[in-house]
Image (cartoon, rainbow, N blue to C red):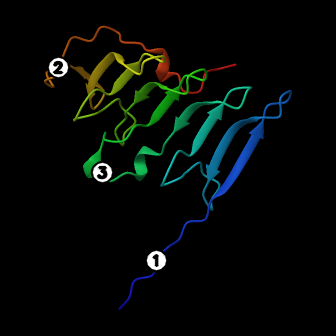
Amino acid sequence: MKSKEHITTYTVEVIRHHDAGHVAVEAWKDEKGNLRRCNGPYLTNYDEKGRKTLETFNVDLFDPFEDGRHPASIRYDPETGNVESEVYFNLSGQLHRYHGPATIHYDPETGEVVGEHFFINGQRVDENGQLVEDIGYEDPIFNLHPEP
């Protein structure tokens, strides 16, 4: 018996900057209206000049055996177009990555890594996976959707 293949249909909502008319947000939604996309970012933000600043991905759509291998969000420097930071979460929404740092900061000019922090299931660890003392870690890149 042949199994039925389900094809997801997406709609793309585009919000434009009032003054410049450039795209401000591109939001992908599934048939139920949920922000979702399985083969790319479901949300992409652009600055007033139309330059990409942030991509947000559905972590729950990735293979659970690859938990933490795909970034939940990537921030871009609008001037250079280079990646500024990447953040990785597990399926429970905790900072998490077994195979590398859960947060990575890059120099926007050179692309060189300037900072990284390791987490497993929301717990801060060192590069060898050993638990480190909670120091009240805060990072501006976690604020993916800042309040106005």
The relative height of residue 45 versus residue 139 in the rendered view (above or below) is below
Which amino acid type corresponds to the residue marked 3 in the rendered image?
A: Pro
Which circle's residue, 1 or 2, is located before the other in the chain? 1
Residue found at x 62% / y 53% = 29
Q: Residue furthest right?
A: 19
Using a 10 Å C-alpha cutoff, classify the residue at mark 1 as few (fewer than 14 neighbours), some (14 to 19) or many (20 or more). Answer: few
Between circles 1 and 2, the one closer to the viewer is 1
Question: Do the CB atoms of the residues marked 3 and 1 lie less than 8 Å apart?
Answer: no
Which amino acid type corresponds to the residue marked 1 in the rendered image?
A: Glu
Q: Which residue is mark 3?
A: 64
Mark 2 lies on a secondary structure that is loop
Question: Residue 146 falls in which quadrant of the image?
Answer: top right
Using a 10 Å C-alpha cutoff, classify the residue at mark 2 as few (fewer than 14 neighbours), some (14 to 19) or many (20 or more). Answer: some
Residue 14 image position (x, y, % from top left) = 73, 44
Residue 28 image position (x, y, % from top left) = 62, 50
Residue found at x 79% / y 31% = 17
Which amino acid type corresponds to the residue marked 2 in the rendered image?
A: Leu
Q: Which residue is mark 2?
A: 131
Distance in Å between CA atoms under marks 3 and 2: 23 Å
Q: Which residue is mark 1?
A: 5
Which circle's residue, 3 or 1, is located before the other in the chain? 1
Residue 100 image position (x, y, % from top left) = 25, 30
Residue 34 is left or right of residue 116, and the answer is right
